[in-house]
Image: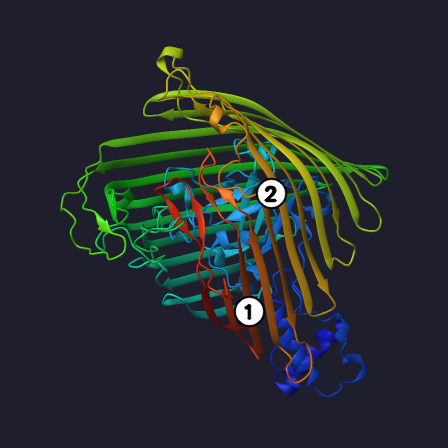
């Protein structure tokens, strides 16, 4: 924003009492600026020293330029020799998203909600593999049930999706990449907001995000983000209630030191019971008709799923001068799933009508601790510049998972269900998994800039210890990364990179083979791409081709069918296109396309050799846009639209169950008036009914139905 425009804002406050115009900020909603446009256009001319430069006012969202996820240093996106996508808080608000799964719908190479609208968990894929999930650079729990904790998107500043191996900076993880959730933090001039939402399935939600300076010194900042939601689901009897509370405090005693304390409490109160429907009646014809997507297969008084997550930690940094900066990131977290009894279907009883059901009792408590220390040193001269990073980190996960099964549940008519016939016997916990995993990692990275060339080198050594029900296992592994980027003056940046990953695997071989504990799976990727972002930052385009190989994949032991053996390999080859483009002051476009040729490239099972990796379509694409009227009597009125395509894909490794492709449409409208924004969002606008995935003949899942959300948001 120009100095002239800031002067106009001050004059409008004192003379015309118009709503304040907010300074352009990476988080600032562009609609707040469109409000400003409306107010300023209506103002009479000021003196020359307060003239308004409207060309500097934008109603499009700022395009991300930097990332700390890929290299753990503040690096421009264009300089990272690896694909990375960023979903901002503005994106989440404008698209009316309520889950991280939904945020992946417009990200190239990523899939979200592969098991439909699951109110308990997130189901994500990146380049054919489930990604690691991090919060503020530290790993989230990976327990049996706690590992799929649904993160509240309203509390996020942005979501960064790093594609491909990242063990060189983070240690053990899958080869597809990681999703890093970045929490909202205090800022001195942040926009405060309160919002209410009403939506499909009786959804009612209220939230607020407030903060700023405490006292006049400016050394202490606070932020408080909170949300409460009550609602249902498109499946009968399932409710989706959420509660989120996240206070944050930042202390900056001087220009060189900053400490931010981050706390989070989140509760999900919902039910199990969506999906797990037979293929006959969903994907395939049934003489009795089609099963309703809203069929609830549990019992009204069972299937409760209550998960509580709490964490506290801090980010600390100190600049010693001369390019030397120390950073420390610490967090302790606890995730609990209350004891519950689930009633789960498993196909028909033989009449293509009555569902066989069993009972399943579960509970889990998982605790995590992580600390990440990094020392960064920038040095060099006019010809060669270095950004050297040395890191030492430690993480520990302890989980206690108990379970039990029962097989005396009554059947359920899938077409005329009658509930309330369950036996009163609750399955006792007959099994327990106590597991503790600790990891220590030491890494070194150097980003070397020579003229327009940028060389990224990294290496890391990890030591991992796992204890499962008293049995101990140790693994150590080295991971490396090499990347070369050439920065052209016109904003183009071609690059090539190679990176490794590893992931610890539980289990052992058959006793007849010696009962040896499994080695970690290992991954390796080669990626070639080009990025384009000119100096003005109004465009960000990326294109990449890659090949990932994952080795030591567990497959069926040909000599001992009840055991597995590590002789498998998965290969994922693909091409991705992704872009964002702000055209003028009030029109933006965004889109993505991914082609992924994934296959089981080595296995002991001849029937699965050459088959596609489950859940991963060969083709997926999306395209969306937003337009806001920035001047005139309709100033502040905006429209958005999007289309998403997901290609056909298999839900099982044998490729016997294929879900057909589907194309879905999204739309939005919004209007800014004074301090208010009124917004309407619709996903799957035509309410297309489709099957998202089938794992077997007995377990299929309907996709997301149409959902509509109305929002009223007040900012100051």
The x and y percentages for residue 338 are 28, 46
Q: CA distance from mark 1 to mark 2?
A: 28 Å
SS at badge 1: strand
Q: Which residue is the site of mark 1?
A: 668
Above-or-below relation of 62 to 533: below
The answer to which image quadrant residue 453 occupies is top right
Above-or-below relation of 429 to 301: above
The x and y percentages for residue 681 are 51, 68
Residue 525 or 561: which is nearer the viewer? 561
The x and y percentages for residue 472 are 38, 21
Q: Which residue is the site of mark 2?
A: 162
The x and y percentages for residue 120 are 37, 50
Residue 610 or 34: which is nearer the viewer? 610
Which residue is at 25% across, 41% downward?
360
Q: Is residue 464 visible?
A: no
Above-or-below relation of 379 to 161: above
Q: How many marks?
A: 2
Q: Where does the C terminus fall, quadrant-wise?
A: bottom right
Kindly give the residue lying farthest to the front in the view shown. 287
Q: Where does the N terminus fall, quadrant-wise?
A: bottom right
Q: Residues within 10 Å of mark 1 (few under 14, many from 20)?
A: many
Circle nearer the N terminus (1, 2)? 2
Q: Is residue 331 visible?
A: yes
Which residue is at 44% across, 69% downward?
197
The colour scheme used here is rainbow
SS at badge 2: strand
């Amino acid at each position: 924003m120009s100095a002239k425009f800031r002067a106009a804002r001050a004059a409008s406050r004192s003379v015309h009492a118009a709503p304040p115009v907010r300074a352009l900020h990476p988080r600032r909603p562009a609609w707040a600026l469109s409000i400003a446009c409306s107010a300023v256009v209506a103002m009479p001319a000021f003196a020359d020293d307060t003239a308004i430069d409207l060309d500097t006012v934008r109603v499009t969202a700022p395009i991300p330029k930097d990332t700390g996820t890929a290299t753990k240093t503040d690096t421009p996106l264009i300089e990272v020799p690896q694909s990375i996508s960023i979903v901002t808080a503005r994106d989440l608000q404008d698209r009316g998203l309520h889950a991280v799964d939904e945020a992946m719908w417009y990200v190239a190479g990523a899939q979200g909600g592969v098991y439909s609208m699951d109110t308990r968990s997130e189901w994500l894929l990146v380049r054919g593999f489930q990604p690691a999930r991090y919060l503020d650079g530290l790993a989230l729990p990976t327990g049996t049930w706690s590992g799929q904790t649904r993160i509240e998107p309203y509390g996020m500043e942005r979501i960064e999706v790093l594609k491909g191996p990242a063990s060189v900076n983070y240690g053990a993880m899958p080869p597809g990449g990681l999703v890093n959730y970045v929490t909202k933090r205090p800022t001195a001039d942040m926009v405060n907001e309160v919002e209410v939402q009403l939506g499909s399935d009786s959804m009612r939600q209220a939230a607020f995000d407030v903060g700023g300076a405490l006292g006049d010194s400016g050394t202490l900042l606070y932020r408080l983000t909170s949300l409460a939601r009550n609602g249902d689901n498109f499946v009968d009897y399932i409710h989706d209630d959420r509660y989120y509370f996240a206070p944050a405090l930042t202390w900056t005693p001087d220009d060189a030191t900053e400490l931010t304390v981050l706390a989070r409490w989140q509760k999900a109160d919902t039910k199990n019971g969506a999906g797990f429907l037979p293929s006959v009646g969903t994907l395939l014809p049934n003489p009795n008709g089609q099963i309703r997507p809203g069929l609830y297969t549990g019992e009204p008084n069972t299937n409760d799923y209550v998960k509580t997550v709490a964490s506290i930690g801090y980010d600390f940094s100190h600049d010693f001068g001369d390019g030397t900066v120390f950073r420390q990131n610490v967090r302790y977290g606890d995730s609990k799933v209350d004891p519950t009894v689930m009633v789960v279907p498993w196909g028909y009883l033989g009449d293509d009508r009555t569902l066989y059901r069993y009972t399943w009792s579960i509970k889990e408590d998982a605790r995590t601790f992580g600390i990440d220390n990094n020392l960064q040193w920038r040095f060099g001269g006019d010809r060669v510049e270095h950004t050297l990073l040395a890191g030492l980190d430690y993480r520990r996960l302890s989980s206690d998972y108990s379970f039990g099964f029962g097989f005396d549940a009554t059947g359920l008519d899938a077409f005329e269900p009658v509930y309330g016939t369950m036996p009163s016997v609750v399955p006792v916990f007959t099994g327990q998994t106590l597991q503790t995993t600790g990891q220590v990692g030491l890494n070194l990275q150097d980003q070397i800039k020579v003229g327009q060339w940028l060389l990224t080198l990294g290496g890391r050594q990890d030591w991992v210890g796992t204890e499962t029900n008293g049995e101990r296992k140790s693994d150590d592994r080295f991971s490396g990364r090499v990347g070369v980027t050439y920065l052209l003056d016109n904003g183009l940046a071609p690059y090539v990179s190679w990176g490794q990953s590893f992931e610890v695997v539980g289990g052992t071989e058959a006793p007849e083979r010696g009962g040896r504990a499994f080695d970690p799976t290992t991954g390796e990727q080669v990626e070639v791409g080009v990025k384009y972002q000119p100096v003005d930052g109004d465009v960000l385009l990326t294109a990449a081709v890659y090949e990932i190989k994952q080795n030591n994949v567990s497959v069926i032991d040909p000599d001992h069918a009840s055991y597995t053996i590590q002789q498998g390999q998965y290969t994922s080859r693909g091409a991705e296109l992704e872009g964002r483009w702000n055209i003028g002051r009030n029109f933006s476009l965004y889109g993505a396309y991914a082609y992924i040729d994934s296959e089981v490239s080595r296995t002991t099972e001849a029937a699965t050799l050459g088959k596609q990796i489950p859940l991963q379509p060969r083709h997926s694409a999306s395209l969306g846009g937003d337009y806001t009227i920035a001047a005139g009597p309709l100033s502040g009125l905006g429209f958005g639209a999007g289309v998403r395509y997901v290609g056909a894909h298999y839900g099982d490794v044998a490729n016997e169950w294929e879900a057909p492709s589907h194309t879905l449409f999204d739309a939005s409208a919004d209007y800014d008036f004074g301090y208010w924004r009124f917004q309407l969002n619709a996903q799957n606008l035509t309410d297309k009914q489709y099957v998202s995935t089938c794992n077997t003949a007995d377990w299929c899942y309907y996709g997301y139905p149409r959902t509509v959300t109305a929002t009223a948001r007040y900012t100051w």
